[in-house]
Amino acid sequence: MTDDERDEQFYRDTEAVAFPKLDDRQLSLLEPLGQRRVLKRGDVVLKAGQRDFGLTIVLRGEIEAFEQRDGEEQILATPHERDFLGDVSMLQGTSALANARVSSDEAEIVHVPAAEFRRALAEIPAVSTTIVNALIMRRRRLSRDPKFAGFRVLSAPDDRAGHELDDFLDKNHIPHRLIEVDSEQGKELANRFHLATRHLPTLITPSGSPLRKPSLREVAQAAGLLRPLASENETEIFSDVTIVGAGPAGLAAAVYAASEGLNTVVLESYAPGGQAGSSSLIENFFGFPTGVSGGDLTWLAQLQAYRFGAKFSTPSQVLSLRYNPEDEYRACIESEGCPAILRAKTVLIASGADYGRLDAENREKFEGVGVYYAATALEGQICRNETVIVVGSGNSAGQAAMFLSDGARKVLLVIRGNDITSKMSDYLSRRVQAQQNIDILYRTEIRRMSGNQTLEEVELENTKTGERQVVRTPAVFSMIGARPCTEWLPEEIARDDRGFIKTGTAVADAPVWKASKHQPTPMETSLPGIFAAGDVRSGSVKRCAAAVGEGGMAIAGIHLSLASRRNASPDKT
């Protein structure tokens, strides 16, 4: 079966899920939440770039959703009676990717405002299951549609900044295309928008606006990822729990906290998913016998948290945390780009760890254009029929090697030691050793990288014999070491000798806990009400499932912390 035939089969198989008809009961549950409107032909229902646009249900007539691109229109869908308009942007609160207008002489709709729609998703299962499954499937179909552009990144070939924008949008699951300015389409776009080399990379939004040499924050604002957590005049934002970091631990905590009615804010510095989100296939995650893409797993978890009302802001780099032991709101958090102070009754630190950079000559030159820290389909295209190098001996390295071996001619797994079984899961190490096109180079390190604009060669040294060899390769995947992201924390939060946060019994002797009637819960730090989970926590096992469990345990501890404070406080009513 060809790729085109597989796509056609996919669209046929997913039609019913993506475009269901609402039944009488679902309509009766949704209609009281919105308003009926009668519209005429050409009336606009939705504009690309619009946010918080709510749910539109068609009662009679026809609406057409379309993408307007370079003076042409691409019809995406034509909702009729009992159909509804929208995609995953409605869950995430991100920008609409398309336009919609009435295409019949007259149409009658029910418009459910965004806030009421999100409440319905959380409180009315008879409605939410059908709609959420449809929105997710529509986004998947849209992402596979070669005729749909979404956001477009116009970049010079092998430009690092262009690849960074591409990576940022990809990891945040924003449909987009990377277009080289030297291509026929690229030349047309550069001419249309009067773009010179000094303007690249340029982001072209679905509404047709070009952003020349945008920062990641500007890209996030255009995509609706960087959401204002406070209104224009507010100087403080209040939450029951603020979660710093949206890896598996942070996402699990967001789902549990929001679903249990806690006012939940999540701050993420780059893209939800953390290291797990970059894993091409996690095969030992509970409930997925054939494995699951880390990106899919964490994306769905984020949508789940959105559904229950968690508020996300990306990219939001936390600058500092101040602790107020006598205040109901124990922590004040300052975040880059957010003028308001976040005041939180509890905080979960799930900021993860930065994974080690290779100590190799010229490595910095090839960051993003030959040196990568994740092996996903995006990077896999670069490696097809090539020799590629994976550095590391843990599960991440093994998963990357197996994924890349499917398309690469050869994968060289480079490790400093003489064994891969001590750090890698048994099933994975056996599979890596048995894979015919994976060669394991023990006691080997990368000394030098070279190439013009992109990586072309790597020099390897056997540290036992001193022998060196040069390998031609377009890609090195670094999966080594970790440094906890804790530099923004106050000194009062105890850490081990490697900088990872101590929790539970390890902090029971901290001064605050010695003076307290209570003991710290398993995920609680040396400051009551401040919790840590996932890779940033001392003693964590660095597994996706374990991080998810820790996120859930942290929320259990947060409930106890909030309850103990309520019980200790005098009745103010």
Image (tube, grey):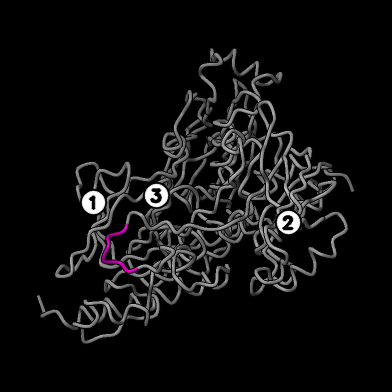
Comparing labels 2 and 3, the label whose residue is closer to the camera: 2
Magenta residues, as a range?
489-494
- Left or right: 553 in relation to 527: right
- Left or right: 491 in relation to 36: left
Quarter residue 66 falls in: top right
Q: Residue at x 23, y 59 (%)?
A: 322
Q: Residue at x 48, y 67 (%)?
A: 534
Under mark 3, the amino acid is Ser
Q: Main secondary structure of the magenta part?
A: loop
Under mark 2, the amino acid is Lys
Q: Quadrant of the C terminus?
A: bottom left
Q: How far apart are the two marked residues, 2 and 1, measured between alpha carbons? A: 54 Å
Q: Is residue 121 visible?
A: no
Secondary element type, mark 3 = strand
What label does residue 313 carry, if any?
A: 3
Q: Is residue 223 or residue 45 the one in the foreground? A: 223
Under mark 1, the amino acid is Ile
Looking at marks 3 and 1 on the same chain, the residue that comes earlier in the sequence is marked by 3
Q: Position of residue 456 (x, y in %)?
A: 73, 33
Q: Residue at x 57, y 39 (%)?
A: 63
- Read off the residue under disc 1: 341
Q: How far apart are the two marked residues, 3 and 1, measured between alpha carbons? A: 14 Å
Q: Is residue 286 or residue 434 the one in the foreground? A: 434
What label does residue 464 carry, if any?
A: 2
Comparing labels 2 and 1, the label whose residue is closer to the camera: 2
- Left or right: 496 in relation to 427: left
Secondary element type, mark 1 = strand
